[in-house]
Each structure stands twice: as C-alpha cells, then as structure tokens.
Image (cartoon, grey):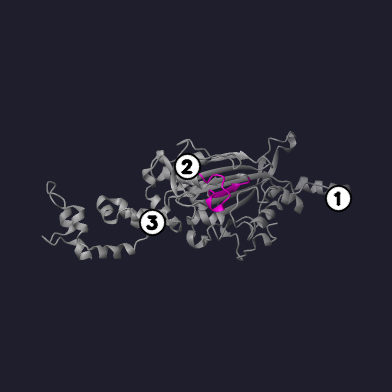
C-alpha cells in the first residue's frame, strides 16, 4: 500500500520528487493519487480509523469527500457515538470564534455576549449561549462546574473561553485574568481571592484560591464546625476538591487552629501568675505550626495542593481599636484544571470526582509542585518553602462515612 502511494506508476516519480517539481509544472490531481488504491483497500484503511477521524478525512479536501461522501457525518448523529461527535467538532473549534461548543447538545451555539462574558456567583443566571437543555433536570445535560468556594463555581465554558483565547486569538474567548475575583462570603466572615494562570509548558489552566477567616483561640468542636463548614451544604467555606473528606485535610486545619495562643483567663492567684508570666514572656504574634499541619498537602487522587497558615491580620470590621489585629486562618489551594477541551479531560474530571477517572497525582506531577509552578510565573520569591506530603497517606476512601473530617 505504501509503495503504491509513494510512486507514480507511469514515470516512477516519488512524492518527494513531485513536491520538488518546477513552479510552472502542473500538479498531479488528488483524484489520480487516490485512484491508485482500489475501493476495497480504502475500506480496510478506514476500518482502522475512529468515526471522528473518518468524518475529518471527508471534511479535509474535495478528493477525500468524493471518496467518502457524507456517510461519515451522518454516522456521527448516532447517540452512541456522542464522544466521537465531540472529538470531530473539536477539530473545528479554531474556525468558529463567534461560537462555543455545547457538550449537552454536541453542537456549536452562538455566543450571546462575545468578548464580554463575566464570571458571576452560582445563584445568578449567567447564560453564555442559548441551549435547549438549559434548566433541564437531566444530570447528563447539565454544565460541568468545579467548586471554588461556598456559593462560587467555575463553569466549564469559562475554562473553554480562557483556553481558546490562549490557543487561538482573543476573538475566540476572554483573557484569563478576567476570571480572577476578590469577594467576601455573605453568610460568614470568610473572604476569598481567586487567580488564574496558564502554564506555558503544558497549556493547562491553573487556579489559586486563597481563603481567610478570623479565628478565636480555644474553639470547642461546635465552634470549629461553625467556623469551617457552610450550613447550606456542610462543605468547607474554603476551596476543596472532591476528595476533601478522605485523609488529613480537615484534621490538619483543626490542628493549625489549636496553635493559636489563648488569652489569660480565670481569676484569683492563678490569673495573676498567668498575667505575670504573659508579660515576662510575651508570645510572638507569629504562630508556629507543627509538623502535622505545616507541610503542603497534595491530594493523591487529583492535581490539588493545600497550604494551611495562621497569620496576624487586620480586622477593619471590629470597632474596638484594641482588637484591630487578630489571628486569621488562611487556607490556599492550587489546582490544575486541565487543557479546557472537554469536561472529561483528566485533570478537570479528577478535581470534580467525575466520569470515574483514575488519577495518581504523585506519579503525574512528580517532584514539581503545582504551587511552585503557579507562584513561579508571578513571583519566584513567593514559592512556598514547605515539603509536599500526601493529603491521604493511608489511602482512606470513606467519604461521608468517615468522621475525621467532621
């Protein structure tokens, strides 16, 4: 077969010799080259191609379209070939800047507000295109979202737009910096800051979410739950991946809170002694964490890393000037959200715990931390100087049945 494609039978010229033909010398029509192989042999060749590639071959030029016809395109209408239809449409993504691929319909929809798309809270309607499945109760037709914080998500179409603008032109999407936000949770005293970047080495979308809340010392278990968990869905206020209940993430956060020094309390001679001890050996405002809560925690099942810190911060909401500075819990999460092509992309699906994907972050990432890659693109001096350990060293997968997170 390769011999028949590589040589012209009439004059023995190879394809390389044909390419080196003089400019005024006529080119060989594609139909003549394709006719060198019989139709039965073409059928064998096409049997090795997936339906998406066969449809792309028919779409590539007039010669192949004459050979294959429209049958490969009609074949993709079969619901069982949904993934193949999406793969074929992805080949056309760069040619349709005014449209966006909808994975519920497996078709391109025209963008409603091209170039002005803005990321909004989850409870605000924010359609990017008109889809007949909008508001559908069918879970398979809903837009895939990754959770950022309580009440905030990143819908997959925004990841598409950011990566399209990076891979093609600015007309195809939106700048990645337009996704970044600063906001305060309306149901708690948590404040959040999100920032996005694209790794030039892998062309993957990276996100950093920094969450902060003032914490009182010596909180009982009920106080810890009130500080950490949202009462609407009982997920942490700060950013977490789908595997946050397994392992040591929440125990590490509670361990960090236990290091906040308690003020002098009680009465009598014991209080006088404690106050004297406090004035002679005044504790530092810098809280030192232990070896359990200080290291970076990496989720072994998805590309997410967590850093837990306790810092002195200014509380402008407190009218008492003597309580202006307080200890604050700061939880930072770095995640790799993948290349923004499909919702079943390995990194995106792993962070959301969807599609049954299996991901080993320590094998995939190796010794290179996501936090180091992200911070190195902005300020190399800000790279966290902590070792990376597993968030789930014992391989627990208890989920809701576990009690360490609670």
Residue 176 badge:
2
Q: Earlier in the sequence, mark 1 or mark 2?
A: 2
Separation (CA) of disc 2 from disc 3 = 37 Å
Q: Secondary structure at mark 1?
A: helix
Say above or below: 194 vs 399.
above
Q: Which residue is mark 1?
A: 270
Q: Is residue 126 magenta?
A: no
Separation (CA) of disc 1 from disc 2 = 58 Å
Circles 2, 3 touching at the beta carbon (< 8 Å): no
The front one of 179 and 294 is 179
> Is residue 96 something one can see in this rendering?
yes
Q: Split into 4 quadrants, where in the image is the N terminus?
A: bottom left
In front: label 1 or label 3: 3
Q: Earlier in the sequence, mark 1 or mark 3?
A: 3
- The residue depicted at 25 percent of the width and 62 percent of the height is 39
Residue 75 badge:
3
Q: Which region is colored magenta? A: 131-150
């Amino acid at each position: 077969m390769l011999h028949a494609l590589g040589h012209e039978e009439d004059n023995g010229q190879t394809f390389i010799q044909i390419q080196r033909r003089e400019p005024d010398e006529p080119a060989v029509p594609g139909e003549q080259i394709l006719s060198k192989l019989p139709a039965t042999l073409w059928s064998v060749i096409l049997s090795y191609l997936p339906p998406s590639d066969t449809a792309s071959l028919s779409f590539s030029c007039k010669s192949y379209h004459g050979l294959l016809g429209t049958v490969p395109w009609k074949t993709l209408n079969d619901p069982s070939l949904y993934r193949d239809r999406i793969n074929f449409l992805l080949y056309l993504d760069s040619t349709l800047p005014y449209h966006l691929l909808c994975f519920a319909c497996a078709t391109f929809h025209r963008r409603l507000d091209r170039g002005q798309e803005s990321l909004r809270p989850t409870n605000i309607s924010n359609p990017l295109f008109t889809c007949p499945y909008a508001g559908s109760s069918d879970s398979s037709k809903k837009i895939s979202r990754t959770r950022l914080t309580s009440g905030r998500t990143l819908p997959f179409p925004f990841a598409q737009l950011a990566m399209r603008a990076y891979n093609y032109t600015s007309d195809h999407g939106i700048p990645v910096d337009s996704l970044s936000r600063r906001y305060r949770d309306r149901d708690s005293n948590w404040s959040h800051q999100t920032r996005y970047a694209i790794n030039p080495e892998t062309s993957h979308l990276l996100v950093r979410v920094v969450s902060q809340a003032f914490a009182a010392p010596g909180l009982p278990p009920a106080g810890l739950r009130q500080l950490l968990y949202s009462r609407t869905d009982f997920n942490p206020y700060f950013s977490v991946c789908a595997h946050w209940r397994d392992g040591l993430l929440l125990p590490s956060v509670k361990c960090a809170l236990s290091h906040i020094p308690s003020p002098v309390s009680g009465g009598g001679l014991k209080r006088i002694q404690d106050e004297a001890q406090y004035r002679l050996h005044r504790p530092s405002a810098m809280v030192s964490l232990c070896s359990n809560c200080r290291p970076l925690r990496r989720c072994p099942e998805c590309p997410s890393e967590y850093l837990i810190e306790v810092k002195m911060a200014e509380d402008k909401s407190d009218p008492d000037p003597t309580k202006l500075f307080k200890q604050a819990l700061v939880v930072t999460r770095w995640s790799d959200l993948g290349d923004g092509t499909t919702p079943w992309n390995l990194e995106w699906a792993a962070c959301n715990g969807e599609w049954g994907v299996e991901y080993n972050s320590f094998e995939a990432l190796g010794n290179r931390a996501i936090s180091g890659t992200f911070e190195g693109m902005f300020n190399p001096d800000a790279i966290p100087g902590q070792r990376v350990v597993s968030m789930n060293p014992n391989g627990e997968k208890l989920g809701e049945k576990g009690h360490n997170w609670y």
